[in-house]
Amino acid sequence: MHRTLAVLSALSVLSVLPLAAQDKPKEKQLKVVGDFGYVNASGNSSVTTLNLGEKISWRTKSAKVSLDEYASYVYGKTDGTESANRLGIGGRLNYHFSPRLAAFGGLDFDYDHFAGIDNRFQEPIGLSWLALDAPKNKLTLEGGVNFVQVTFTELQDDGQFDHQYATARAAGTYKWLFTEKGYFQLFGEYLPALETGIGYRMNGEAAIVAPVKGILALKVGYLVRYNSLPPAGFKTTDRTFTTGLQASF
């Protein structure tokens, strides 16, 4: 009797496993995320801030190839005078050797006149590895090189308005899912120049997204950008705190 019950129990478990695999939702081929934040204060103080962002991710049915496109914009006025104006936009093509290892190549463009950058193009290439793939925790590590062409708003100490150089690149992204749609994410990036006299850059961002209803969520972000040798007359560190709504499709 006990042996019969054991066999029946084993068969029932085996019959459920394929059903569980079938019930697992398939990952979307196309994902679109948009961010929006706006603040306007008048009276004793006059402040206007605007932050926009979007990301589009697409992958083939085989999941061998994927494409990411992203953009962000921050604008601010204080007492009627422009105090922030930064745009960043870029894209990346990924080829996945396996679900956890991929090669990528990208193109990024940005400007930030308040940091002395009139325009900057970057072409990162390298490898991406999903080092941790747990249900609630994800850790992605990246390594490669980055080619940079930058034009400054002011004449530099070497008598040039622009520089072209290459950097190494190391980056990591950690994501903790505390609900099905809510998460906390940390991103860090280190870009040491491969020639003397350029220095290194570091970028870091922390973000928390809390779902509100349906496709909408609240997002709070904090971005730090550091340049060990900034353009002449500018500071090494820029910090940006943003809040707003996020919509995911």
Image (spheres, helix red, strand yellow):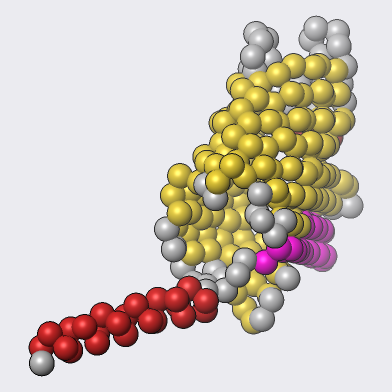
Name the residue located 89 percent from the left edge and 52 percent from the top edge.
80
The question of residue 120 being in magenta is answered with no
| Magenta segment, prevailing SS (helix, strand or loop) | strand
Q: Does 167 sit above or below residue 36?
A: above
Residue 141 appears at what percent x and percent y?
A: 52, 40
Describe residue 136's horizontal placement relative to residue 109 as left or right. left
Q: Does 171 sit above or below residue 36?
A: above
Residue 18 appears at what percent x and percent y?
A: 45, 76
Counting the numbered discs, the total is 0
Name the residue located 86 percent from the left edge and 11 percent from the top edge.
160
Describe residue 116's horizontal placement relative to residue 137 as left or right. right
Q: Answer yes or no: is residue 183 visible.
A: yes
Q: Quadrant of residue 166?
A: top right
The magenta stretch is 28-54
Name the residue located 67 percent from the left edge and 66 percent from the top edge.
28
- Image quarter of the N terminus: bottom left
The question of residue 40 being in magenta is answered with yes
Describe residue 203's horizontal placement relative to residue 179 as left or right. right
Q: Does 23 sit above or below residue 248?
A: below
Spot the residue most to the left.
Answer: 2
- Image quarter of the C terminus: bottom right
Q: Nearer the viewer, residue 185 or 47?
A: 185
Q: Answer yes or no: is residue 189 visible.
A: no
Residue 125 appears at what percent x and percent y?
A: 68, 31
Q: Nearer the viewer, residue 3 or 220?
A: 3
Q: Quadrant of residue 238?
A: top right
Residue 6 appears at what percent x and percent y?
A: 18, 84
